[in-house]
Image (cartoon, rainbow, N blue to C red):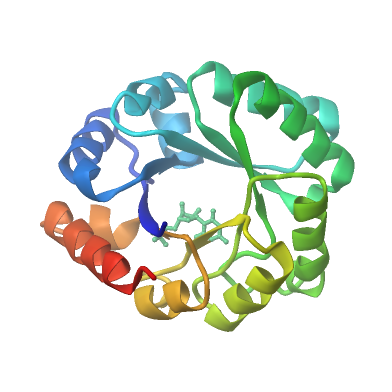
Amino acid sequence: MVGLILALDVMDRNRAIWLAREVSEYVDYLKVNYPLVLSAGIEIIRELSEIKPVIADFKIADIPYTSSLIARKAFENSAFAVICHGMAGSDTLKAVLDVSDEFGGEVYVVTELSSESEFLRKFSDEIAMLARDIGCHGIIAPATRAERVAQLRKIVGSMKILSPGVGAQGGSVEETIKAGADYIIVGRSIYTSDEPKAVARDIYERIKGLEV
Ligand code: NUP
């Protein structure tokens, strides 16, 4: 199963809801991040969840206790999954996983960012191993470096790989899927377009055309 995730980094509630509805037939998940949640309030997760399951990209990276409070807020507001920073370490990941288990939710772990990420890149293989070994559901791997997606795939086996960095950051849909990503995360290429639905359809069709 390969698919598309819309990164909804817009600052306006109504625009976010409109965009989500507009592209819903082509996306599997909606991803929210601080720009939208800090602008529209955490309730936006609940509202968007009525359209598609929502991934809360809070890049949780705190001590276990604080991290578990953040994860709980996301899941209490109907998030399907949260994104955690693997660099925070095993105790933090386990605390977030415990909360997600209570809600039947999922936890995806940032290995290295799609940007320069020169520090995380030194440890991203170890972060992926940790995410795998403690039972997280997926990792975030950079579409801007498809070769890293392929290397991380070897480490995480059948775990989900979600890859941001396609389009605005220069990554390619085809190379990222061929390298082993399950989901492509796309934000600006879709939501800044005059025709978000047409762009989402085009990416969706290209992804589905590569499905094995
Ligand atoms: O490594 C990462 N790179 C990245 O771009 C991890 C992320 N979570 N993201 C997020 O994916 C980023 O915060 C944004 O929400 C989305 C990419 O958006 P765009 O570059 O397609 O607009």
- 25 left or right of 105? left
Residue depicted at 56% across the width and 69% down the height: 142
Q: Position of residue 17 (x, y in %)?
A: 25, 32
Quarter occupied by residue 107:
top right
Q: Position of residue 155 (x, y in %)?
A: 73, 68
- The quadrant the C terminus occupies is bottom left
As drawn, 132 above or below 121: above
Quarter occupied by residue 115:
bottom right
As drawn, 208 above or below 29: below
- The quadrant the N terminus occupies is bottom left
- 108 left or right of 2? right
| Residue furthest right as drawn | 91
Q: Position of residue 70 (x, y in %)?
A: 67, 27
As drawn, 4 above or below 65: below
- 86 left or right of 90? left
Q: Position of residue 141 (x, y in %)?
A: 59, 65
Quarter occupied by residue 152:
bottom right
- 52 left or right of 59? left
